[in-house]
Structures are given as structure tokens and as C-alpha cells.
């Protein structure tokens, strides 16, 4: 159940659960009031406060929507009984009727103003007005075709009086034609000032819309037309410039993309040429192995400075793997050096011989052995020992031959 209560402190009307109200007091949440009300939470001293109420505005209701409608209605009146309850359809109907009444009143006032409004173009028009009204009273038995505005036809050329035709012409008044004739006499060229005629010719443009009767004449200022034409030209110019800048930007981007593509193509060609050159150099080196003189060793050391060529040599030497490290080291040394060249070296430079360990070829041998899968985790000593023995026995092998 829901109760509609009137709080005493701020004189507001709210909808609360019925069990919140007790002894002229009602529980009210300190925060999130709408959420607490819809969830029908049990009041407590921490989240709620108890406020005094004047009265219940109506009996308890079982629908929250109906209770909220009663609460809104009670903000303007204290009578919220079921007999005075209006549905939404009844409220909309009453509002539409009130709007129609106001519309009819405004339309009637505008018609009366249009009928009673008479132009005064010259002092002589005051005298002519009296004679015109007498003609209207005397000629009440005129033909139906003349009195009926629906049968009225305008065959005369376009004149200035037609610009005011829409303001004065009304279907409810049968004397409109007499008033138009009166204006035709008062607006003769003799009575219109020359300055006014000049301004009317230079600044007024008449456009007649014949879709309805009477004719509707709209006036357009020449300066307004010029301004609208300038605005259109400015918009066209702005759009053209924006399009030109967009095309220019897109052209620059396309040129940059083409340059990047050309550069990448050149890089690929250079790389292919380099690889082809490296393969050619590698084949030349392999054909000249084993090294016989120190000059050949110097040239070989210089070529090993190229990292790509060194990687290729590591791959070639790693293919000479044997069952153990000693056999692999001896095979690589026989492939690279002759005994005549090795006898001039010692691994540490003993007996005043040249140092073999500082050569790039020595590091090439170590990398080649580490490249082999089964010798990948071997120690440096395991490689140095057979290397020292093979270099030291070069002279002995020559003597045996």
C-alpha cells in the first residue's frame, strides 16, 4: 500500500509506503529517496529521518502510479478524491478545447483589425472616405456578382494597390470592392509623392503567386537578393577551395607512398645484389682454401670483418662436424690451413711464434663449433686443447712426409 502525505516542514506532498507513516510522522530517506521509496526499504535510524506530517491527502492506494498522480494533483488542490480524478485522455481533451477557444478568439481579433484598418495616404482621402461610405450605404441592392467576393476577378495590370490587397481583402465583408475602388482613386499618380515612387521602383520587387485567390504579393528587397547571391557565391568558393586543398593533400600523400615504395624496392635490390656478391666472394674464398701463405691469411682476415660473410663461413664450417670435438677441430683446421702455414703459429705465441688466439679465424672456429647442436654447450677448454695440440704438431707432420 502507498500513502500520499503532506509534510509540515516544507509543505510538500510525497508518496511513501504506508508502513513508513505512524503517529503523524513519516520516515524519509536522507539520500537516494526515489530508490528507497520504490524498493520499499524498512526504515532505520541510520539511513532515515522521521518528519512530521500535516495529514494524509487521501486513502491508502495499492498502485504507486495512481498515488503519484494524486500527489501531483494535490499540489494545486486539496481535493484528490476519486470523483475528481481525471484520466490522461480527459486532461488532453480539456487542453485541446481551451487551445481551440484561444485560437478562435485571436482569429476574430485579427479579422476585426484588418476590417477597421484604413490607409491614409493624403489629406484629401479623409473627404473621399465620407463619400465612399455613402456610396456603400446607397448601393446595397447591387448585383450578386459585384457583392460576392468569390466571383470577383482582377483583370487590371499589376499596380501598387495590389500589394496591400492581402491586408484589407476579407471574405466576410461585402464592401471590400468599394474600399479597393476608393484606394484606387486615392492612389492616383497625382497624389503619390515623387520620392515615394522612385523608392518603390528601385527597392521593391513584386512576385505574384497565383496558386490561391485572392492574389498574394510578396515584396523582396533588392539588397537582400544581392546579399543572398553573395552568400551562395561565398559558399561555392569555400567548397571549391576545400576540395582543392583535399586533392592537394591526397596528391602529396600518394607521392610520399610512391617514394617509399621506390626506396623499398631499391633496398631489396641492393640486398639481393649484396647477397649475390657475398655468395660470389664466399665461393672464391672456398676455392682458395686451405690458406698457404701469410698474405692469404691477411686477405682472409680482412674479409671476415664483413659480418654477413662471417655468418656464411660459420655455416660452411659447421657442416664439418664429427663424432667428437677433437675430430671436429682437426677437420676444420685442415680445411682452413696447411701445415706449412700453421708451423709459424702457436696458440699463445710460445717460442717466439705468432699468436693464433688473436686471429679472427680463431673466433670463427669457436663460433662454428658452438653452431653445431651436439657441441652447443661445450666449454672453451674442450675446444682449446685439441686446437693447441694440432697447431703444435704441424712441424712434426711435415717432417714425416
Image (spheres, helix red, strand yellow):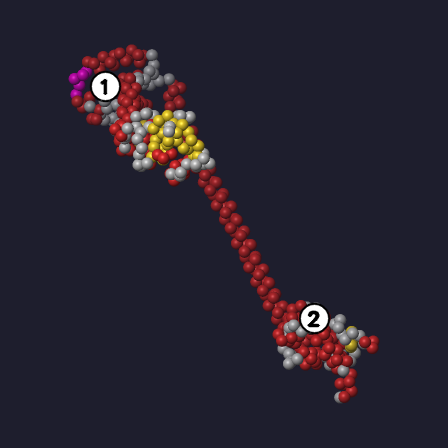
Judging depth in this view, the residue of 17 and 24 nearest the camera is 24
Judging depth in this view, the residue of 60 and 140 nearest the camera is 60
* Residue stretch rendered in magenta on the structure: 139-143
Judging depth in this view, the residue of 312 and 174 nearest the camera is 312
Position in image of residue 361 (x %, y %): 71, 73
Residue 304 - label? 2
Among the 4 quarters of the image, the one containing residue 99: top left
Among the 4 quarters of the image, the one containing residue 104: top left
- Residue 379 visible? The answer is yes
Q: Residue at x 76, y 82 (%)?
A: 393
- The verdict on residue 140 being magenta is yes
Residue extending furthest toward the front = 23
Residue position for label 1 = 175
- Residue 281 visible? The answer is no
Position in image of residue 249 (x %, y %): 52, 49
SS for dot 2 = loop
From the viewer's perspective, is the residue at label 2 or at label 1 nearer?
2
Q: Residue at x 42, y 26 (%)?
A: 9
SS for dot 1 = loop
- Relative to 122, 242 lies left or right: right
The prevailing secondary structure element of the residues shown in magenta is: loop
Q: In the rendered image, which quarter contains the N terminus?
A: top left
- Relative to 253, 209 lies left or right: left
Give whichever of discs 2 and 1 has the lower sequence position: 1
Dots 2, 1 in contact, CB < 8 A? no
Amino acid at each position: 500500500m502507498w500513502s500520499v502525505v503532506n509534510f509540515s516542514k516544507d509543505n510538500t506532498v510525497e508518496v511513501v509506503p504506508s508502513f513508513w507513516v505512524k503517529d503523524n510522522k513519516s520516515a524519509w530517506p536522507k539520500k537516494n529517496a526515489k530508490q528507497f521509496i520504490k524498493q520499499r526499504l524498512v526504515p532505520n535510524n541510520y539511513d532515515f529521518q522521521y518528519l512530521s506530517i500535516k495529514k494524509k491527502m487521501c486513502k491508502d492506494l495499492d498502485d504507486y502510479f495512481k498515488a503519484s498522480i494524486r500527489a501531483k494533483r494535490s499540489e494545486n488542490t486539496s481535493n484528490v478524491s476519486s470523483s475528481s480524478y481525471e484520466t490522461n485522455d480527459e486532461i488532453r481533451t480539456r487542453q485541446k478545447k481551451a487551445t481551440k477557444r484561444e485560437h478562435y478568439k485571436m482569429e476574430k481579433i485579427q479579422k476585426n483589425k484588418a476590417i477597421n484598418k484604413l490607409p491614409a495616404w493624403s489629406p484629401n482621402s479623409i473627404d473621399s472616405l465620407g463619400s465612399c461610405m455613402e456610396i456603400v450605404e446607397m448601393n446595397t441592392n447591387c448585383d450578386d456578382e459585384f457583392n460576392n467576393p468569390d466571383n470577383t476577378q482582377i483583370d487590371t495590370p499589376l499596380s501598387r494597390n495590389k500589394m496591400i490587397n492581402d491586408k484589407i481583402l476579407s471574405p466576410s465583408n461585402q464592401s471590400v470592392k468599394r474600399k479597393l475602388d476608393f484606394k484606387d482613386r486615392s492612389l492616383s499618380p497625382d497624389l503619390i509623392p515623387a520620392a515615394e515612387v522612385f523608392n518603390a521602383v528601385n527597392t521593391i520587387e513584386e512576385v505574384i503567386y497565383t496558386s490561391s485567390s485572392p492574389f498574394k504579393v510578396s515584396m523582396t528587397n533588392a539588397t537582400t537578393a544581392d546579399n543572398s547571391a553573395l552568400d551562395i557565391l561565398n559558399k561555392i568558393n569555400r567548397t571549391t577551395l576545400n576540395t582543392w586543398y583535399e586533392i592537394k593533400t591526397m596528391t602529396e600523400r600518394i607521392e610520399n607512398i610512391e617514394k617509399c615504395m621506390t626506396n623499398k624496392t631499391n633496398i631489396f635490390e641492393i640486398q639481393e645484389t649484396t647477397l649475390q656478391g657475398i655468395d660470389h666472394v664466399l665461393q672464391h674464398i672456398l676455392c682458395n682454401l686451405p690458406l698457404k701463405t701469410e698474405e692469404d691469411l691477411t686477405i682472409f682476415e680482412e674479409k671476415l670483418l664483413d659480418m654477413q660473410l662471417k655468418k656464411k663461413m660459420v655455416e660452411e664450417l659447421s657442416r664439418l662436424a664429427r663424432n667428437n670435438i677433437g675430430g671436429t677441430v682437426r677437420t676444420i683446421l685442415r680445411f682452413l690451413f696447411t701445415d706449412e702455414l700453421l708451423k709459424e703459429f702457436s696458440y699463445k705465441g710460445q717460442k717466439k711464434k705468432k699468436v693464433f688466439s688473436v686471429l679472427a679465424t680463431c673466433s670463427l672456429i669457436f663460433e662454428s663449433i658452438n653452431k653445431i647442436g651436439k657441441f652447443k654447450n661445450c666449454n672453451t677448454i674442450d675446444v682449446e686443447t685439441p686446437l693447441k695440440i694440432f697447431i703444435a704438431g704441424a712441424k712434426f707432420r711435415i717432417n714425416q712426409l
